[in-house]
Image (spheres, rainbow, N blue to C red):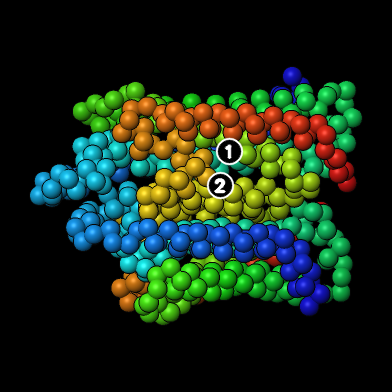
Amino acid sequence: MNIFLQELKAYRKSLTIWIIGVLVMVFSGMSKYAGMEGAGQSLNELMNNMPGVLKAMLGIQSLDVSSPLGFYGVLFTYLVIMLTVHAVMIGSTILSKEERDKTAEFLMTKPVTRPFIITSKLFAAAVQVTILTIVSFVSSLAAVYYFAGEGEFFREILIFSLGLWMLQVLFLTIGSGIAAMKKNPKKAPALSAAILLFTFFISIMADMTENLQPLKYITPFQYVTADMVINGNGIDGIYIFLTCILVSVFIWVTYDRYRKRDLYV
Amino acid sequence: MNMYRHEFKNVLKSTLIWTLSIMAITIFFFSMYPTFSEEAESLKRMLEGFPDALLQALNFNITAFTSILGFYSYIFVYISLAGAIQAMVLGTGIASREIREKTADFLLTKPVTRQSIMTSKLLAAFTAIIITNAGYLSTAYLMAVIVETEGFSQGIFFMISLSLFFIQLIFLSVGVITAVLISRLKAVLPVSLGTVFAFFVINMFSKSIGDEKMGYFTPFHYFDSMYILQHETYNPSNMILAFVLVVLLIISSYVVYTKKDIHTI
């Protein structure tokens, strides 16, 4: 419990900045919605007939930005990018920072087992990630209802947020898995960032052309897509299944590797 | 000169990795152009049925948009994201190394002024950026010539390509000022990734909803490749803004760094 609380305390400054960031992003983003209303039917028609590449070029991904949910969908894509950056960074630093800051010896000589330390740290990271999801969920609800007026959006925004949380947890465990594997504590965040960027670029390429559809399975950024959620299809079961497997594997890797490895002091 | 050489040697490996990665991304993106131009043909046919007024209202120059330069200005957004991350990580890393690695007392007790330390660091980072841009420029040009057999305006092509250099300069100075302002920066990546992605997301969002004013908050917008494509020149006011920003950030970095308390151990 002490380790858990200590980790929460260590990150409170960064968490505060992130919370403010999410709030600013959601509210200033949705506040632009008012100006977008009534873009016209012919525009939507044009958008719907456009080939995938050009849609990707304009950054619209077949979303109707004149509807509140379509507009929120655009914002959601960017929320995912920001919050996965947070998740992968906290996942990789929460384990590796002891070695980076030369406090590993201090912590490891305490009468607790390594699995206990990992559990406390992972919980602390998961709590922070979840706090951000909840902040994003509540502020999104408030912002969409405030700026869009009437309409029923609760279910969609809930699905969006659950999808967001799923991706955050996935990237969190990717980060912690890498941190447990890497002997040099400075390399863990770098490798995690590289994986994040790599999957992000794969996702962009998959958006650009139909030929690269299979790539959608290897990049988490394609697991939760705004148009699927808005059309009422939610999140494809196979992606949820895939995420569960990946998360379990990375958690196992985290425990297995960190328990056995020599620490860098 | 010793300091410059030392700093340069220190960043050389990561610079080479970054340069090669950016070159790889460029090659992948350009190799998608043939698919793109096929899809663009079908769009052209479709758009013939649309009234001219609508297309003008959308600011939609279809010929420019579907050419290799239109394609390039789209993919360039993502290439500049990678470049910006490199530059910010470089700037933050190089200006905070002594503090992170606890070698500040070693360096600062040498008979050199803090200004000259800063200058050596900045020059080393500048050299790294020049190497990256040289690698990028040659790759991009080569790929463009290979995939587009009909020829294109080289002036616009180089103007877009060169904006990578300017964007990197801005993010380098943002990184340096961040490093000198935070008294005990422990990790480079979380803060750099967060900052660059935040600016990137602001830029993408302002583009998706067509909000020009929002663009002033993000360096990515200063060298908007779509603007260069349409006007065949850089946006003069944004160019001045970028220049002033870089000069201000660098001067303040010197001022802060020469006066700041440096924590050792």
The residue positioned 53% from the left and 48% from the top of the image is B199
Instruction: Kindly identify which numbered label has been placed on residue B57.
Output: none
x and y, in percent, of residue B108 in the image = 86, 31
The residue positioned 72% from the left and 25% from the top of the image is B119
Residue for badge 1? B171
Residue for badge 2? B196
The residue positioned 71% from the left and 33% from the top of the image is B252
| Image side of residue A181 versus residue B155, left or right | right
The residue positioned 74% from the left and 57% from the top of the image is A97
Tag 1 near tag 2, CB within 8 Å: yes
x and y, in percent, of residue A62 in the image = 29, 61
Can residue A232 be seen?
yes
Can residue B161 be seen?
no
- As helix, strand or loop, the secondary structure at mark 1 comes to helix
Q: Which of marks 1 and 2 is nearer the N terminus?
A: 1
- Residue lying at the far top of the rendered structure: B1
Residue B248 image-quadrant placement: top right
| Image side of residue A195 versus residue A94, left or right | left
| Image side of residue B15 versus residue A241, left or right | right
* Between B19 and A58, the one nearer to me in the picture: A58
Check disc 2: other Cα within 10 Å, few if <14, some if 14-19, many if 20+: many
The subunit carrying tag 2 is: B
What amino acid type is highlighted by mark number 2? Answer: Val
